[in-house]
Amino acid sequence: MDFFPQGIRAINLGDSGFMVVRDGCSIFRSPVQQHGFNFTYQLESGNGGDLPSSGQVFTIPVTPGDVIIAGTDGLFDNLYNNEVAAVVVHAIRTGLGPEAAAQKIAALARQRAVDRNQQTPFSTAAQDAGYRYYGGKLDDITVVVSYITNSANT
């Protein structure tokens, strides 16, 4: 992701992604790219992968106070956007920095990943694809949180 006066420019491929939270609400979430249910775009060496040119490019306007959350599918398969936004709001209200916010989001995603009694984005997608699946999905969970602040040069 690059920061520009008009916002951030990002490219995303596959099921990792990012979202922007403003005033406690998710205002943008990068879409998942997949060939079929649970068969996402991915780069690989050899001839079987998708090309970098398949990535989607975004320019998202941001303002001071916005929060960017980037994460792997282990985050986005297990937490809905509003759940991530709620953790961000709580982190900011309690004075936590972005690293601590990321840790709290990752911990909640991990908790949901092993919960077989909780509806998750992955279980919703599985059900929509015709599978009988309920609960979280154990997977890698990486979360990076960035707080957008005023530029030091202004």
Image (cartoon, rainbow, N blue to C red):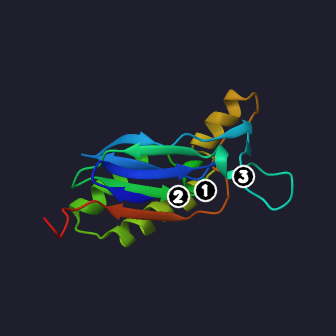
Earlier residue among tags 2 and 3: 3
Three-letter amino acid code at the position of disc 1: Gly
90 horizontally vs 152: left or right: right
Query: Which is more toward the observer, 49 or 77?
Result: 49
> Do tag 2 and tag 3 residues touch (Cβ < 8 Å)?
no
Is the N terminus in the top left, top right, bottom left or bottom right quadrant?
Answer: bottom left
> Can residue 133 be seen in this snapshot?
no
Q: Residues within 10 Å of mark 3 (few under 14, many from 20)?
A: some
2 horizontally vs 143: left or right: left
Q: Residues within 10 Å of mark 1 (few under 14, many from 20)?
A: many
Which structural element holds mark 1?
helix
Q: CA distance from mark 2 to mark 3?
A: 15 Å
> In this figure, which residue is indicated by the disc labeled 2?
71
Query: Which is more toward the observer, 117 or 24?
Result: 24
> In this figure, which residue is indicated by the disc labeled 3?
42
Query: Measuring 24% from the left and 50% from the top, which residue is drawn there?
Result: 63
Query: Measuring 73% from the left and 29% from the top, which residue is drawn there?
Result: 129
Q: CA distance from mark 3 to mark 1?
A: 15 Å
Residue occupying the far left of the picture: 154
Three-letter amino acid code at the position of disc 3: Gln
> Can residue 77 be seen in this snapshot?
yes
Where in the figure is residue 62, as x and y percent of width and height? 29, 49
> Do tag 1 and tag 2 residues touch (Cβ < 8 Å)?
yes
Label of residue 74 in the image: 1
**Number of disc labels:** 3
Query: Measuring 27% from the left and 59% from the top, which residue is drawn there?
Result: 148
Q: CA distance from mark 1 to mark 2?
A: 8 Å
Mark 1 or 2: in front is 2
28 horizontally vs 148: left or right: right
